[in-house]
Image: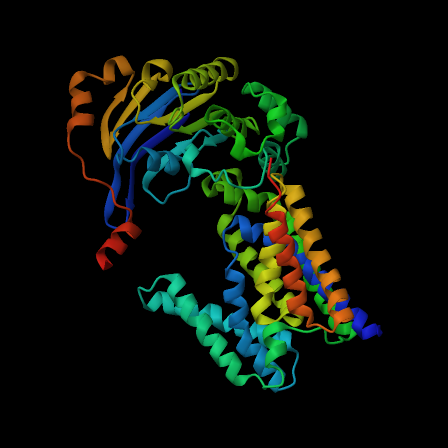
Amino acid sequence: MNAFLSVQDLSVSFGKLRVINNVSFELNRGESLAIIGPNGSGKTVLLKTLLGLTEHAGSFFWSPDARLGYVPQKIDADRHLPINLQNLLEAKASIQHLKRADILSTVKTVGLPQETLRTPIGHLSGGQFQKALIAFALLGNPNVILFDEPTASLDELSEEHIYELLNELRRERGLTVILVSHDLSIVPEMADKILCLNKSTVCFGPPEEALTEEVFAKLYSEPHKVFHHPSEHHHRHHA
Amino acid sequence: MSPQEMYALALALSAAFAAGLMGCFALMKKMTLAGDVMSHIALPGLGLALLWNIQPVIGAIVSLGIGAVLIWKIEQKTDLPTETTIGVMFSAALAIGALVTPSEDIITALFGGANPVSLQTLLLYVALSALVVIFLWVERNRLVLSLFNADLAIVTGVNVSRLNLMYLIAFASTLILGLRFLGALLVGALIIVPAAVSRQFTHTLPNFLAGSALVSLLSVSIGYALASAFGLQTGPTVIALAASVFFLSLFKKKK
């Protein structure tokens, strides 16, 4: 069976600093992969590279029928814009020539009441906003979803709702899911496979096989170099 | 009112409509002060055009173009932050503009005026306003998405880099539209103030755009009428009126 995603010797550097080093793995259709690792280990960079947002060495191949949906970290979205959820979803629907009915059905799928469409995005609760971002990603019917820190700054109940929703989507739509998280609690809830990342691959495989105590210690105890963005370095250098 | 004076009012209204819509995106992009900077850079060209008796809009376009290239070159050659380079350019442009502009025209260059215009000039300005409005309307969803999250916009199929360049060109065009009747010192205000008023009243994009365009059009039309009735300068009257509406809007409690 051909892999849905095949990654070979993938490396990403910012200037002279290598943030991802020779990562290789494969993912089958319908599987769920959790990319875990400490802060600064390259998880988000890897996700963005798989979305085609970052220059890289090495290669990765999506199946030709892959349709990608992306859920960015909540904190990376500007919630101060004077738009409501309907404006946000209509923006994507308009760009991708989707039907208005798709917006209503997607909002229903993620479990948001229809009235939420009229709510300004800045007034949505943390859990509602996360669901709104998932609705945005689901619009256009993707068959793979790439999710950056799904439960960051959510309370336990909202976390549980997000896990339930993602598992439901996987069951009902056969969705392939790639999650990035610094939180290990996501693994038993969500992952068929796990990629432990600390710039290079520390482990890869089914969680019960891959995430041994030894690996865990290596992943989280070993001091790793703090990543500095080139612009940050530039400023410090001239300070 | 002579036909030429009517044309001048129509020109101001078409520019006001474009500026009202442009202001919404400038406010969302947090670049409301960029209008002041860019309009000052247009001043030397405007002054030279007045001195040589050529179409002021041509002088403004050339001056803005040279200013943009200079900022870009200085950034490449030095480690200075962009805002420092722009700050120096904007002060230098104001000084050079004041030196080259004939003294009898300096007030018009800085604060604008309601001088009569020909039908040909009106049509040129209306065409440019229409281009700005069409660009903003067609690209509004891409612009909003790129502001919400640039990566999300790229994954959705938006060429963010090209969109930003197009937006800057449209932004500069809007300044050029307003320079004639508001002058280099005030044109930025017609981009900022109506959008700031509208933002006080709404959380939805269509209302934000419509409110800003309406405030802009009303400020210009009522400002023109007041200036004409009381013998005041048109540009400052328009902007003082718009600013008064902004201060009044602060009393409105947003839901």
Residue A3 shows up from this direction = no
* Quarter that holds the N terminus of chain A: top left
How far across and how far down the image is residue B134, in percent? Answer: 68, 53
Name the residue at 53% across, 31% down: A123
Residue B246 against residue A110 in the figure, above or below: below
Quadrant in which residue B218 is drawn: bottom right
Name the residue at 53% across, 84% down: B100
Residue A164 shows up from this direction = yes
Name the residue at 48% across, 68% down: B68
- Taking the image as shown, residue B128 lies to the left or right of residue A132, namely right
Count up the numbered dots: 0
Quadrant in which residue B238 is drawn: bottom right
How far across and how far down the image is residue A218, in percent? Answer: 16, 25
How far across and how far down the image is residue A177, in percent? Answer: 42, 23
Which one is in front, A195 or B187? Answer: B187
Residue B253 against residue B92 in the figure, above or below: above
